[in-house]
Amino acid sequence: CPPILHNKPIQSTSNSATMDKILSRVSSAAGALAVGAFTVNSCIYNVDGGERAVMFDTLRGGILPDVRGEGTHFIIPVVQRPIIIDVRTKPREIPSVTGTKDLQMVNIKLRVLWRPVIEKLPQLYRELGTDFDERVLPSIGNEVLKSVVAQYNAEELLSKRAEVSNRIKSELIKRGAHFHLTLDDVAITHLTFGREFMKAIESKQVASQEAERQQYVVQRAEQERIAN
């Protein structure tokens, strides 16, 4: 009788080779997808709400003059680099210690609501970087405070606070525009003098109240005399 031939080992070897080919193709496809995803990600960037972007371009000599708005944008990898800048209105407190016209020292704080001028972002970044608020607002705030406060004596700062606040606001808006910053609101939030001056003010108020009381007593006595 002829020997019986078994084909199972041959089929097993064939199936193994097929699986190897499939796995190799899957691996190649996965590698290609990974490379493709990396390439796509390196060619795009997102600008979120409340932000803008300026572009640094190596081949064209630095910061480009246009501003990129919200959304997804394309870049040339290695050659270009986006700089994202927050353009939302933000508060900032500016403290200062300065002298009045009559040489009284006053502690004063301003609350400023500010935002950058969007059209000027390339120039702003080129001149001051991304921390432009740190470099500009304290400086111009102290400059304006010292200039305006020096034109009033201590009592006028208290009695004409609204006028002083408006003058500070007007001057600070002008100075901010010079550095491409828009100031939406400026207000005095804190104003105090030295202890000795405050005691003098309190004594003066007490004396004024006492004088008014004495005047009232005299007028009442006069009215009673006339009535009798």
Image: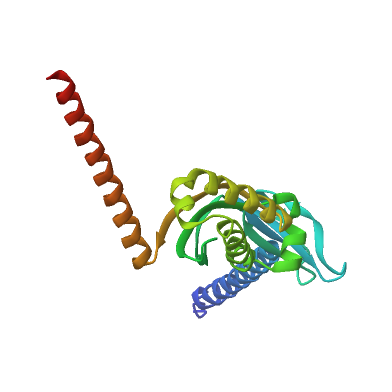
Picture coordinates of residue 27, whole percent (x, y): 61, 71
Picture coordinates of residue 88, whole percent (x, y): 57, 50
Instruction: Work out whether 69 lies above or below 125.
Output: above
> Residue, x 65% and y 60% (percent of image)?
84
> Residue, x 42% and y 56% (percent of image)?
190
Picture coordinates of residue 139, whole percent (x, y): 61, 66
Q: Nearer the viewer, residue 24 or 45?
A: 45
Any part of residue 48 in sight: no
> Residue, x 31% and y 62% (percent of image)?
199
For this orientation, the residue located farthest to the right is 60
For this orientation, the residue located farthest to the top is 227
Any part of residue 71 in sight: yes
> Residue, x 30% and y 46% (percent of image)?
208
For this orientation, the residue located farthest to the left is 228
Q: Nearer the viewer, residue 33 or 226?
A: 226
Residue 138 in the figure: left or right of residue 198: right
Residue 160 in the figure: left or right of residue 116: left
Instruction: Work out whether 115 lies above or below 40.
Output: above
Quarter assignment of residue 147 = bottom right
Query: How many numbered marks have been drawn onto this rendered protein structure?
Result: 0
Where's the C terminus, which quadrant? top left
